[in-house]
Structures are given as structure tokens and as C-alpha cells.
């Protein structure tokens, strides 16, 4: 029986939000593998805010996706055929094999994972790029100390939820900013945040003053825009601001809104620094071991948001930007 590969390719670079015209869907026959290659049946695809940045033809930390290419994405799947010395049929592997149902690979960027140790979607979330981003951005870039106040924007997302829980493990007071009462309740009741601010219904600046009476020592920012300015007005001496993302700005059709309140960094002798997770690749095993231990001990709670069907990719991706996802967003490929 002929196997058909379902693929989503970049058709045109979007201006503002990606639309139906951004993508081209196709079904093509899965090719035969050559020596040194393996065939992977992709089971889950990671959907992340960074994917929007990869669509722009601009200098960044990684090359943009080219027109006509399969859309880049983190993936986990099972090896169906192998002519590669390091991978055997039946192995589960993670990589960046894109938004497609099958991938032929020469093994570059692939690593094996154990489906018996954790559910496969975990390797795209808490034990994958988002978890690594939260771990290193907080512990290596922000370097929080016990007793400090840590504020996290996008706190109910894949990165933010990990950041807040690790900050609690390290003895910090943690305040999350998220959209909607359900997400805020989840942060406090299930993830153990000390307080949560609903940016959709609260005055963020006012709520921050109440939630952080002793000011903000660490701000882990996934959102940017007005929320970044609001937090900068509350920072303490020698505060650390981690710039992980700016999801509020990714679909702008005008210039990105930078922090107008940046002089607070001068007054407070504070530091603002970006985090790109790929800078820490050599230390991934340490982070994965720590996070897995915290999951097993119950100190980290995992919430995945799984949507079925690779055909839904364009609409499912947009859930990241309209706030409809709740936890780590993963696309289950299906048959």
C-alpha cells in the first residue's frame, strides 16, 4: 500500500497574521530511503509562538523558512524504516522534521526518546524546547534567589508555566499574568503560583502593585508590549528582565512596540537579556533530568493542549495568538 505524506508548506510570507494564503497543503508519495537515511512516522508536532518569527525574511537567531519549504516545527515520531547505523526500526525520535506526517532524515538533529518514561507530547513541551527555554532562561539568565519576587507573563503557556513552577521550587514568590479567569485559577490552584493577574479583565499596572508589594526582582517576559512597560514600572534595584518572546507583537503590521519605560533599567541598575534556547544545547541532558525529577516528585504539573488532525494546522497554529490554547499546544498527526 502506497503511503502518502501530508505536508504544509510556506506559500507566501504573511503580513500580520498568517492566513489561508500563507500555506499550501499537499499529499505526495513517501519516497524510498537511501543508505544513511531513516523514515519517520511523525506522531506529534509542536506548535510554538517562535514559528511566526521563522516566517519573516529577516535576520534572526535561525534562518527563516523558505518559500516552498515544509513548515519548520518540532516533532516526535517512530522510525518505520532505517538504513542508518544509529537508529533502529521502532525507535522514537525527536527533531525538527516539520509539519508533515512522514519525514525522511539523515539523522541530523535527531535524538532518541523513551516512550515508556514519559508521554510522547512531553518531549515537545516540558521535556522539549519550551521546558528547556524556561529552565535556562530562569536559572541561567535570571538567576533568582529564594525570597525574591518573580513575575511571569504568558504564565499559562508552555514556557511560562514551567518558569513559574521552577521559581516556586527555588523558593521564590511567583506572580503569573495570563488571559482569563480560568487560566488564572489554574495557575494558583494547580501550579502553585502565589497570585495571578488576568490581563483581559484587570488593570495590570494596578494589580501588579497589589500582588508585588515589595516590587519585582525577576520578570520573565513572553508577551512584550504594554505588559512589559507595566512591569518595568515596578522593578527593584538590580532586577533581571528575561526577554523570551513578545507574542503580542508578532503579527504587527506596524513597527514593534518597544519599552517606553526603559529608563527604569537605568534608575534601578537593572539588566534586560534575551534567551535563545539553542545556546544551551550541551546542557539539555541536565535540564531534562532535573525537570523529569520534579515531574516525578509532583513539584511540576504538566498541561498539554492536544488538537487532532494535521489538516487543522493553519487554524490550530492561530490558537497561540488568540489565547485559545491552554497549556502546551501540540498537533496530533493522526492517520
Image (cartoon, rainbow, N blue to C red):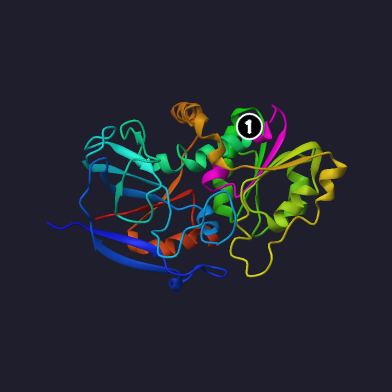
- For the magenta stretch, what is the residue range? 140-162
Query: Residue 118: horizontal and vertical position, in percent?
Result: 36, 34
In the picture provided, is 205 more to the left or to the right than 67? Answer: right
Outermost residue toward the right? 267
Q: Is residue 192 visible to us here? A: no
Query: Pointer 1: residues within 10 angstroms few (<14), some, or many (20+)?
Result: few
Q: Which residue is mark 1?
A: 140
Q: Which residue is painted at 27% across and 35% down in the image? A: 87
Task: Decide whether residue 151 is among the magenta residues.
Answer: yes
95 versus 173 height, above or below: below
Outermost residue toward the bottom? 21
Query: Residue 8: horizontal and vertical position, in percent?
Result: 37, 62
SS at mark 1? Answer: helix
Outermost residue toward the left? 1
Query: Residue 143: horizontal and vertical position, in percent?
Result: 67, 31
**Residue 92, quarter of the rendered image:** top left
Query: Residue 310: horizontal and vertical position, in percent?
Result: 33, 59
Task: Decide whether residue 27 is among the magenta residues.
Answer: no
Q: Nearer the viewer, residue 96 or 191?
A: 96
Q: Which residue is painted at 83% across and 38% down in the image? A: 269
Number of marks in the image?
Answer: 1
Quarter occupied by the C terminus: bottom left
123 versus 329 height, above or below: above
Q: Nearer the viewer, residue 194 or 331?
A: 331
In the picture provided, is 151 more to the left or to the right than 82? Answer: right
In the picture provided, is 181 more to the left or to the right than 307? Answer: right
Quarter occupied by the N terminus: bottom left
Q: Nearer the viewer, residue 328 or 5?
A: 5
Q: Is residue 10 visible to us here? A: yes
**Residue 162, quarter of the rendered image:** top right
322 versus 110 height, above or below: below
Amino acid at each position: 500500500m502506497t503511503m502518502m505524506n501530508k505536508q504544509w508548506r510556506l506559500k507566501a510570507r504573511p503580513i500580520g497574521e498568517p492566513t489561508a494564503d500563507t500555506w499550501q497543503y499537499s499529499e505526495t508519495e513517501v519516497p524510498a530511503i537511501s543508505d544513511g537515511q531513516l523514515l519517520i512516522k511523525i506522531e506529534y508536532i509542536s506548535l510554538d509562538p517562535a514559528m511566526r518569527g521563522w516566517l519573516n525574511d529577516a535576520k534572526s537567531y535561525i534562518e527563516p523558512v523558505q518559500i516552498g519549504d515544509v513548515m519548520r516545527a518540532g516533532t516526535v515520531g517512530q522510525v518505520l524504516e532505517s538504513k542508518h547505523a544509529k537508529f533502529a526500526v521502532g525507535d522514537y525520535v525527536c527533531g525538527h522534521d516539520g509539519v508533515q506526517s512522514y519525514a525522511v532524515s539523515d539523522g541530523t538533529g535527531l535524538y532518541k526518546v523513551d516512550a515508556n518514561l514519559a508521554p510522547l507530547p512531553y518531549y515537545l513541551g516540558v521535556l522539549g524546547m519550551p521546558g528547556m527555554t524556561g529552565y535556562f532562561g530562569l536559572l541561567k539568565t535570571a538567576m533568582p534567589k529564594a525570597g525574591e519576587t518573580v513575575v511571569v507573563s504568558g504564565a499559562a503557556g508552555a514556557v511560562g508555566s514551567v518558569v513559574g513552577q521552577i521559581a516556586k521550587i527555588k523558593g521564590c514568590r511567583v506572580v503569573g499574568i495570563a488571559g482569563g479567569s480560568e487560566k488564572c485559577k489554574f495557575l494558583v490552584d494547580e501550579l502553585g503560583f502565589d497570585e495571578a493577574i488576568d490581563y483581559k479583565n484587570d488593570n495590570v499596572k494596578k494589580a501588579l502593585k497589589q500582588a508585588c508589594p515589595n516590587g519585582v526582582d525577576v520578570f520573565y517576559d513572553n508577551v512584550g508590549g504594554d505588559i512589559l512597560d507595566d512591569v518595568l514600572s515596578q522593578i527593584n534595584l538590580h532586577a533581571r528582565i528575561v526577554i523570551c518572546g513578545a507574542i503580542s507583537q508578532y503579527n504587527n503590521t506596524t513597527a514593534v512596540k518597544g519599552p517606553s519605560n526603559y529608563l527604569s533599567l537605568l534608575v534601578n541598575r537593572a539588566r534586560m537579556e534575551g534567551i535563545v534556547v539553542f545556546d544551551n544545547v550541551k546542557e539539555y541532558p541536565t535540564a531534562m533530568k532535573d525537570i523529569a525529577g520534579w515531574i516525578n516528585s509532583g513539584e511540576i504539573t504538566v498541561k498539554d493542549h492536544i488538537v487532532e488532525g494535521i489538516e487543522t494546522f493553519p487554524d490550530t497554529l492561530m490558537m497561540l495568538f488568540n489565547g485559545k490554547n491552554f497549556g502546551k499546544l501540540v498537533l496530533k498527526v493522526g492517520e
